[in-house]
Amino acid sequence: MTHAFNISLALYVIAFVAAALALTFRRPRLERISAALLGCGLVAQSAYIVMRWMAAGRPPFSNMFESLVLFAWSMVAVYLALRRRYPLPTLSAGTALMATVTLAYASAFHSAEIKPLVPALQSNWLTFHVLTCFLGYGAFLISFLTAIGYLVLLRQTKQGADGPLAALEAVELKSIAFGFLLLTVGIITGAVWANSAWGTYWSWDPKETWSLITWIIYAGYLHCRYMRGWKGKRTAWLSIVGFACVLFTYFGVNFVLSGLHSYAS
Amino acid sequence: MDARLAAFLSSPTLAVLLLLSIAIACAIGTFLPQGADVGKFLAAHPDKQGVFAVLAKLGLTNVYSAPWFTALLGALGLSLVVCSSRRCLRLLHTRKHTHPRAIAFLLTHVSFILVLAGALIRLFWGQSGMMALEEGQVSNRFEAADGTRIVLPFSLELVAFTIETHDAPPAAESPVEEKLRILLPGTDADGFPLPIATGRTLFVRPGVGAVAQAETTNDLAITVLQQVMDFAFDNATRSVISRSEKPNNPALQVQVVRGGTTNQQWVFARFPDFDMHTAGTSAPFKLRYERRGDPPPADSRAMIKDYKSHLKVLENGRVTKEKVIEVNDPLRHAGYTVYQSGYDQHNLAWTSLRVTRDPGVPVVYAGFLLMIIGLAAGFFMPQPKANPAPISDTARESVS
């Protein structure tokens, strides 16, 4: 099982190197190789998740290590789904880099030990809720990378509406729309699960509240985009702010807010 | 409604401003202590009383129940109602030319109104509280958060409360390592480790370490008098017992003699910051019992697989329903839902139940369903305009 994890990590590293070389030497073929390596890494990682699921006897989505593995899987899956229509080398490099960093951080700082589930997590809702949330996070990561790419490219060159900037904007919108839908489903499944487990679908828990804040930011993005015609730098920055909220929801609530509230525990 | 007022209430600008305000208020509520946590925070930081008095006046110590927060949500609801009504009218007038996406997004806005309406129903007509039951006990009351006692139209009897534990992991291949560490003020912060040998006296000189015998009044004579694997204190006999041979709560009784003063205390491997003196006063040193390689104790949270309450519903003296409830599997009866909430670690004959009644849940769930349908249909339906063309090779190269 550990071999599958290491293989996927190694493939992501090589994919990043290939994508970086593709960017440096302007070789579209290297970008295709990078995408293929990401695909192979995704297969290896999928195998790891399935093996861990079988070994644990329950979905492997219950602690920080397992969620980081799922996060890496999600970002690569979303990128490859979008790549068919929008093959962008910068996105390939960014996704490979983020997947590598995520898996490396998971293996270095979090235990991979399989532990039994506490009673509150023993529910089929665990799979639906966590999977949809993390697919949403993966999509928001892609939108973050495209926003960064957009802003960097904007500084370097002035392109018309048909240029690559337009393609980056399109990917940003599509990934946010996809991520917003999945985050909505994730929040809803979490609320329904909370109601069936504890008798209340919303209790203003910090994790719930920050996921709502993230949802609001992206809802604001979509309103500004569709209703006010916002484009370009403004939406790129809004996408970056939205992803900052995603990171705070995922990590900040666990490490920052838990410290703030430790006096109460 | 005046056309300009309606236009203002349904404007995207107002909606975004309201959403932003709600987001900021939500964030504040996560950073500042809220509700009952304020008292605990001030107990730990009494110097912050003045600041929190001001925050309380501004409603920032109870954000989610504050009138201004409720007003923000109400304003958002009103904006949604006006916006959705105008859209609906527009769609009815132009139905032949209406793209299905517009209907999908209208549904999404209506769904949010339903969710807010469901929350409002819970606020006015919902009930929630806790009930503690002992095995064999019958009760028809539960206590709300504000202390109010609410009477149920039926009674609940706890037939039995059970805890299931996971199988203990197999014993480690390497032997258990244990040592007794003595920490003396002014010496190495990690303390001085000693082997554990029951009945044998070891001598320690501060600043030097182990010595053959005590020669000065500062030297300590340390003896491990007893070792138990599963420490418990029997209140009836006022004596220490070991509940089992499993290392669930390993403890050592240690005697330390220094300069004619004798100190005896129990030290615990799983609770390094806790000790229990049985003779002598507090000592100017600290003992720590360290063990590595033990499996987690049988009753630790990590080992709890499940906890269940076997309940009977009694009405007019007859049993009308019977169910074993657990977390994620509550009992529903007469509009009330009874959830397995917790239990008493020190008395496993007690169970803690949460009882709720929320007539707003079906409305909220309808809103959830509509929201998913509306968003999925809106985002995945073909757009009225052509999609951006896939990027060409030339454009792809210039991106890199």
Image (cartoon, coloured by chain):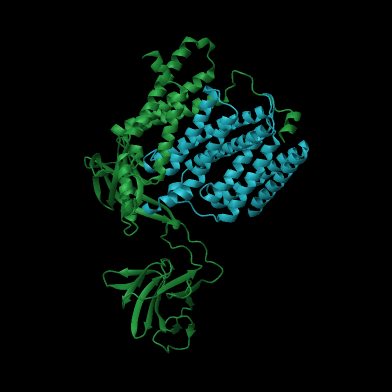
Chain colours: A cyan, B green
Q: Is residue B137 above or below residue B265?
A: above
Q: Is residue B246 above or below residue A127?
A: below
Q: Which residue is painted at 49% across and 82% down in the image?
A: B208
Q: Position of residue A127 (x, y in %)?
A: 51, 42
Task: Count the labels in the image.
Answer: 0
Furthest toward the left, the residue is B316
Q: Is residue B50 left or right of residue A234?
A: left
| Residue B56 found in image quarter | top left
| Residue B242 found in image quarter | bottom left
Instruction: Determine if residue B310 is in view.
Output: no
Q: Which residue is painted at 26% across and 52% down in the image?
A: B136
Q: Is residue B291 above or below residue A110?
A: below
Q: Position of residue B139 (x, y in %)?
A: 24, 46
Q: Which of B323/A138 is in front? A: A138
Instruction: Determine if residue B294 is in view.
Output: yes
Q: Is residue B366 left or right of residue B138?
A: right
Q: Is residue B115 left or right of residue A241?
A: left
Q: Position of residue A91 (x, y in %)?
A: 66, 37
Q: Which residue is painted at 55% across and 23% down in the image?
A: A229
Q: Which of B232/B398 is in front? A: B398
Q: Which of B33/B324 is in front? A: B33
Q: Position of residue B67 (x, y in %)?
A: 31, 34
